[in-house]
Amino acid sequence: MKRTRLRNGLVGFLVVAVVLALAVLLGLFRPSTVAPGVQEPLTDAQTRELLPRGRELALAGNCMGCHSLPQGPGGAGGVPIDTPFGTLYSSNITPDKTYGIGKYTREDFHRVLRDGIAPGNRNLYPGMPFVFTHITRPEDIDALYAYIMSLPSVAEPNVANTGVFRLPVRPFMNFWALINFPDRQPPAREGASEQWLRGAYLVEGLGHCGACHTPRNVTMGVSFARSLEGGDVVDGLVVPDITANTLAKRGFSTASLSEYLRSGISAQGTAFGSMYTVTHFSTSAMQATDVEAIASYLMTGKDGQLLTPAKGPEPLPSASDTALQRGRLSYMSACAGCHGTEGEGIPNVAPPMNGNIAVIMASPVNLLTVILQGVPTQTFTGNQRMYAMPGFADRMSAEEVAGLASWMRAQWGGQGKIITAEQVEAIAPVKKTKTD
Amino acid sequence: MSIEKRSLTLTINGQKVGPVDTPVGMPMIDFLHDYLDLTGTRFGCGQGICHACTVMEIQPDGVPIETRTCIFDAHFFNGKTLITIEGQAKRDAQGEVSALTPIQQAFIEHFSFQCGYCTPGFVTAATVFVESLKRQPVKRADLQSRIETALNDHICRCTGYVRYYQAVQDVALKTPGCVID
Ligand code: FES
Ligand code: FES
């Protein structure tokens, strides 16, 4: 008797679990959250009026940054996004009727940005930052729709994804969404200024800063509880913490941060890696008021006060230790010619090292990566540029690079931990073995 | 404040130099000019951009590479082997130039340079490039673009690029084993 009841209970539980799983798989927990009234197409007059706003928002979202190859036609997709499970390729978002999104209705487009679901109930992978664009207001989604549909069509087929993404796994994204896709709202705060609200809306929404700057959990979902704390590795570089406290500690003010976003250049270093794409294509082209709003939101502390810049770290006493002098001499012989004996840099040639975030970060990965691999010549707003830095992987030994980084970090980064040759080798094989 | 010095030893144009006490932070080009009176290496921008100050460094495996002398301090080259413009041509027992290198000869024949300020750098770059072709030949169709890439960093204020490139093409085509069809 007792056993039958137990068995029945178990069977019942299994049935419920299977039914629930099927319901999730079929997307029953992901109903459309698009605004009412978007079934009506936009009129020509509405479209025309919305265009400038759509252009600015598309810049804020850097849609073209991910959806265009550097040399390719704008919006035609094909940019690889590597994940541990395979490579995703961004899609063609031009209004081409065959290969692009030309057949998307206004409502389809809203559903994509709000819910991450494309026509035909096709779940998008979270390479598309819909967990961020979700908070975008209906009138702004309309503006983006108007703008994107006004772009030239490009008849470029989409590139097939690889790895796991070749399999029919899209329905399983519903499970992912169940854990990782909260119903977020545009940020609000009692007594907040218009500027703060605008900045918050852009940073937390279309701007999707957190897509890189907020760490991800084991299922690759955004850990919103640790918003903008950085620490993940993107394209081989550790993403910096951009919470207000940390930005202030690194010497940023609202003014200098917005100057950085507009130009790509700051006293804390120049944009490189993926952030260069952001400043180059997105924030440098946006309206000044929007960039200032972003900067002021980022610089606002938890108590709602704007934080002011702190002084950079003082040299640690250990920077003068005999053990670190080899590193100092390496700096003098290999780096000081461009970066200056005091780490002051040369405008339009080489960024300062004194106060540079790559030197200050607790993780040495970015500093070592740049020393070993160099940085190509980059152009910045207003005809500014930074000249190519050569990589030193084949000109210095791992011990030399380790000593160099250890001294730089003690001198300008407030970081006393000694870097080992193994840490250097872990980043890139170093050709030269003998030290002189 | 006294100037911090370190001992420096290296090989330049086949001659052992040092050990000599050299200030920390002295660019290699100053060491060449002031300590060794090798003034053929040209100082242009001093910021690593124009490549006028380029000399040849012979790596331990014998492969030559280009290196700038304005941005690296003399000590960066401690223990290394360099060839400056003075060390390119063959010299007789009296130290007089007896035979130019094929690249030097070709630059003269093609009237490649005008004021000549950038020429030591171009000689170095072109020589390193032709040496690289001997190890890894290039298809004839790709030769021109490869020359452009190889010399691209070098700035010639007199804008003599075309004749430099033509001269290098000439040498590459005439040197056996550099170009394949
Ligand atoms: S002088 Fe050295 S690169 Fe210009
Ligand atoms: S020949 Fe005058 S700078 Fe090149």
Image (cartoon, coloured by chain):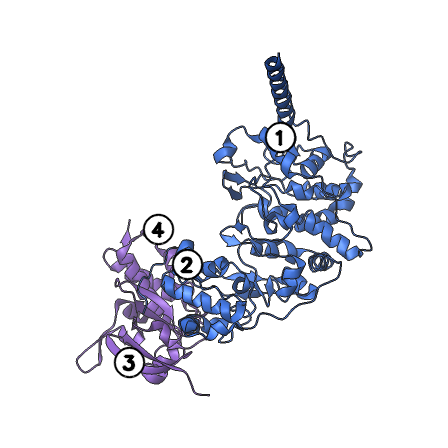
Residue A122 numbered mark, or none:
1
Q: Which residue is mark 2?
A: A424
For mark 3, what is the residue? Answer: B19
Hey, what amino acid is under mark 1? Arg
Q: Tell me the CA gap for discs 4 and 1.
A: 47 Å
Report the chain shown in blue.
Answer: A
**Mark 2: few, some, or many residues within 10 Å (few <14, many ≥20)?**
many
Q: Nearer the viewer, mark 2 or mark 1?
A: 2
Q: In front: mark 1 or mark 3? A: 3
- Residue A17 in the image, given as x and y percentages of width and height: 62, 23
From mark 3 to mark 4, how far is it between C-alphas?
48 Å
Which chain's residue wears label 4? Answer: B
Circle 3 crowding by C-alpha within 10 Å: few under 14, some 14–19, many from 20? few
- In the displayed structure, would residue A192 be above or below residue A336? above
State the residue lying farthest toward the right.
A191
Residue A11 placement, left or right of A105: left
Q: Please, which chain is the residue tagged with disc 3 on?
A: B
The quadrant where residue A302 appears: bottom right
Of residues A277 and A230, the one nearer the viewer is A230
Q: Judging from the image, what is the letter of the chain drawn in purple?
A: B
